[in-house]
Amino acid sequence: MPSIHDFVTWEPLLRLLRAGNPETVAAPGRHVAGRIGHDGWSVPLPPRFPPPGRAMQVEDMQDEVDAVQRVQSALADVGLDRISYVAEMSSTGRTMLHLLTFGPAVEAGVGPYPGSLILVEGSVPEPWRRLPHPVPGAVQARSVDPALLERTLRERIPGATGATETEIAAAEARLGIALPDELNALYRVTRARWQDWRDDYAAAQCVSDAVGFELFPLDALYIADAPSRPCPWEFAATEAAVTPPDAAVQGLVGSPGWIAFGDNGGGDRIAVDLTPGPRGHVGQIIMLGHEQNIGADLLADSLTDLVVHRRRNRHSGHRGDQPPVVARVNIKSLTSVQAAADPGLEVLSIGVWDREPLSLAAVTGLPRLHTLTAYPRTLADPLEIAKLTGLEFLNLGPEEWRVLVDAGAVPRSLSAAAITVHGDRHPLPVVAIANELLALRKRPPILQTILEGHLTPGV
């Protein structure tokens, strides 16, 4: 196979792009761009439709699939996960192809554009650094009864293979934490290993029915701490870790006291909580939603309540996306930056705006503000950002970034940054700004390789 940096590798895809975008090819200075990775691709081609009465099938777009797989194979040969491309094609067939390799300092973005730029190696957003607060006086719920739990489970799944004390001790050593008595009792009845069921789906279902959820095998237990819940900077930085005084569950990304031991069948993790909120119990059962980046819901006060008494009272436990901690200024929410200004403000997002550009003076000096995102052309003076000395994440349009870079006013406090692009903007100027930001922190740049070739018209 030709290499990823060989024009021949890209030629089938380029021919499809040329045929599918005739107006772009005919217009000087225009481009087509996209991204190809092992997990998917973006290729700007006209939509295709199956014959009436039939669903879309791979065969209906086989030429596109074949062309993309050719590039994917070349990516695999050099160990790359993804690559962006920008093609400039003339009506005569002359083609210039720009290949963009983002490297370790750039997260995946949308289409051909770079995602968040990691300006400080290994940095994570503020909510991902939060540890649980101690809750003096927190105790177990009265319903905790390991003996009843064990006895009930032995009745429901007679003959199950339980874990030995040695196996439980090994799990505790791996996790670095002792299993609470209820979880210990559960695994003494069944260690939930597929090998023990001898490929018998009915036996596996019997265990799930007995406990009320999909139980992880003992050797698959894990600590649901912050690193176990990864999230791109662009989204993670707009979250806030907040625990109200009446919360049963702390509003955290993760905790060293959350032991995940099951799943509800839909991707939501079930865990024992040993670091409860102000109104919670030690050993309560929580659920970490797969569509949430932060927080967890309370399922039951104890494993005994959940399994034996079938008490499942799901209470949402996270309210960290509300003012004053997180504020959104746009045509539908807050209508001024002044309305967002509060000593507790951590995240300020300025979105769609149809009035005069906004000043940031009202939020200058706020002690906890760590994230600012602003749609292009919503700020009256981008240089006001230099006065926000506590920012760790900043997301702006290309023009606003250009003002900051040219003035030498990019905040030194930033750990990560993002460039918001709307519409079909040429990716190369955006990449140029991204590389200037990366160079300020001596981070690996986005690499660009230019290939030139000729696509014979009509062939």
Image (cartoon, rainbow, N blue to C red):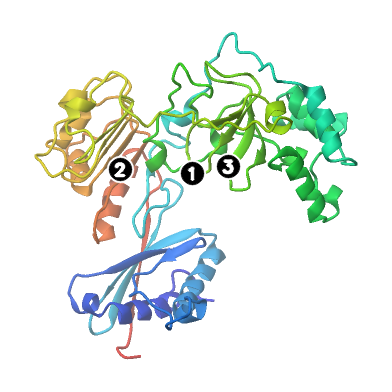
- Which image quarter: residue 333? top left
Q: Residue at x 38, y 77 (%)?
A: 48
Give the Cα distance between marks 2 and 3.
38 Å
Q: Residue at x 44, y 27 (%)?
A: 241
Q: Quadrant of the C terminus?
A: bottom left
Does residue 169 appear anywhere in the picture? no
Q: In this figure, which residue is indicated by the disc labeled 2?
A: 437
Q: Which residue is at the front of the view, 79 or 197?
A: 197
Does residue 182 appear anywhere in the picture? yes
Q: Secondary structure at mark 2?
A: helix
From the top left corner, tell me how far across and down residue 58 is, in percent: 51, 76
Q: Secondary structure at mark 1?
A: loop
Under mark 2, the amino acid is Leu
Q: Is residue 168 above or below residue 208?
A: above
From the top left corner, tell me how far across and down residue 392 is, in percent: 35, 31
Which label was assigned to residue 268? 3
Given contact means CB atoms under 8 Å apart, are the residues at marks 1 and 2 in contact?
no
Q: Is residue 400 left or right of residue 242?
A: left
Under mark 1, the amino acid is Glu
From the top left corner, tell me how far across and down residue 193 is, in percent: 80, 45
Q: In this figure, which residue is indicated by the disc labeled 1?
A: 291
Label 2 environment density (alpha carbons within 10 Å; few <14, some 14–19, many ≥20): many
Disc 1 vs disc 2: which is toward the camera? 1
Disc 2 vs disc 3: which is toward the camera? 3
Label 3 environment density (alpha carbons within 10 Å; few <14, some 14–19, many ≥20): some
Q: Is residue 240 left or right of residue 169?
A: left
Q: Is residue 77 above or below residue 205?
A: below
Name of the residue lying farthest toward the right: 159
